[in-house]
Amino acid sequence: MKMTVQELLSFGSITVIDIRDLESYQKSHIPGAKHVVSSELIYRPSLYLQRNVKYCLYCDVGYISEDVCRRLRVQGYQVFSLLGGYRNYLLSR
């Protein structure tokens, strides 16, 4: 499932995770976002996620986060991909 920037900003309780590389995250990220690289989420999700918590994942443009979300949903996690990724977030601000 995808989530727009407007939905993210109006969503009550959701944890935001930046899955871009560390350098990109350190340069700029959505305020309050945690950083976890995509491979960690795919191969070791239980270290970072809980099944009863909702998460919004984002990458640069949304393609990678959409793929990661698809893989995590199969495992029972409540994850959403930010439509258009971080670039869309910047354009929406």
Image: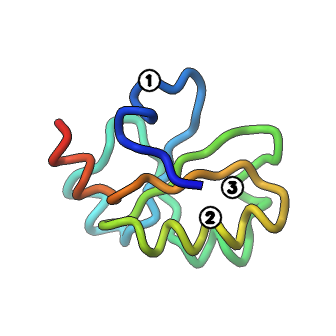
Residue located 43% across and 52% down the image: 82
Residue at image mark 1: 10
Name the N-terminal-most of marks 3 and 1: 1
Mark carried by residue 51:
none
Instruction: Give the quadrant of the C terminus.
Output: top left
In the rendered image, the vertical position of residue 36 relative to residue 5, given as above or below = below
Q: Quadrant of residue 8?
A: top left
Name the N-terminal-most of marks 1 and 2: 1
Badge 2 marks a residue whose secondary structure is helix
Residue located 75% across and 61% down the image: 73
Identity, as a three-letter code, of the amino acid under mark 3:
Tyr
Left/right placement of residue 88 relative to residue 69 reads left
Residue located 49% across and 67% down the image: 65
Left/right placement of residue 72 relative to residue 61 reads right
Image coords of residue 83 (percent x, y) = 40, 55
Mark carried by residue 48:
3
Tell me the crowding category of disc 2: few under 14, some 14 to 19, or many 20 or more residues within 10 angstroms, Cα based.
many
Labels in figure, total: 3
Mark carried by residue 69:
2
